[in-house]
Image (cartoon, rainbow, N blue to C red):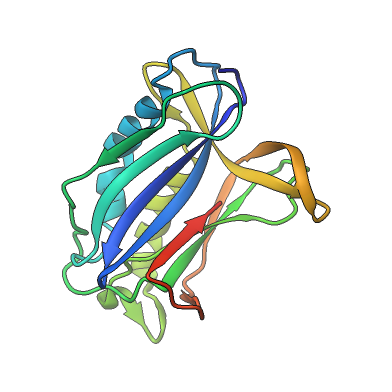
Amino acid sequence: MAVGDIFLLRATFRSHARIWSINQHYVDATGQTDLLAAQDLTDRWDADYKAGMLAEMAADTTFESLYSVKLTGGDAMPSLKVLPSPPGTVTGRSLPPNTAVVVSLGSTDVNLIRPGRLYVAGIPHSKILNGNLTAAYLITFKAAWEAIAKTVITTGGGNWQPVIYLTVLAGAPRVPTIGANVDSVRVKPILYTQRRRNSRQQGTT
């Protein structure tokens, strides 16, 4: 492996009898040589962010698994961590998973044309007022996801920089693909709804 290799980390959830996921991307910032680097990333993400993330989700939403796989560069074993379905900690039911809060990811990288996006479901009914997030919930939600989406992860093997994965240039596949460092996070109190209703949904950078 080398500095700049990109990994996908996918967090998978269940609510309203549907499976949905959030995809993030990380760059190996230190050029790790351990073939189990993906497992290191998965374990550290779980330890650092699980509690804060579930604190913003309704109790009927469960966190099912974490999966990490290398997308660019040399060899590394993928990692799948199946969790014991820990639930969100906000009392009550969630909105359907096709209704989500958009976490917009910004970067000063000149290659970035539009912000990255994470679609976060599991939003509690009790935190909605007049169709939008309450002011108090917006503050805690943004703080939690700013930490998750922007913070460099440090493991025993090295550092992981959150990035927006850039795969297209001028309408054509970008070769090679690159990652733009996440420098800022923005969350609006607006709820977004996917018109197409699937049993499996994904939000990605």
Quadrant of the image containing the N terminus: top right
User: Residue 50: image x %, image y %?
Assistant: 28, 45
Residue at position x 41%, y 31% from top? 78
Instruction: Say if 109 sits above or below 115 in the image.
Output: above
User: Residue 2: image x %, image y %?
Assistant: 59, 18
Residue at position x 48%, y 59% from top? 203
Instruction: Say if 133 sits above or below 205 in the image.
Output: below
Is residue 80 at least partly visible in the picture?
Answer: yes
User: Residue 156: image x %, image y %?
Assistant: 36, 17
Q: Residue furthest bottom?
A: 130
| Among the 4 quarters of the image, the one containing residue 47 | top left
- On the picture, is 174 further left or further right than 94? right
Residue at position x 49%, y 29% from top? 160
User: Residue 53: image x %, image y %?
Assistant: 31, 52
What is the number of callouts on the image?
A: 0
Q: Nearer the viewer, residue 175 or 60?
A: 175
Is residue 119 at least partly visible in the picture?
Answer: no
| Among the 4 quarters of the image, the one containing residue 128 | bottom left
Residue at position x 21%, y 44% from top? 83
Instruction: Say if 28 sits above or below 48 in the image.
Output: above
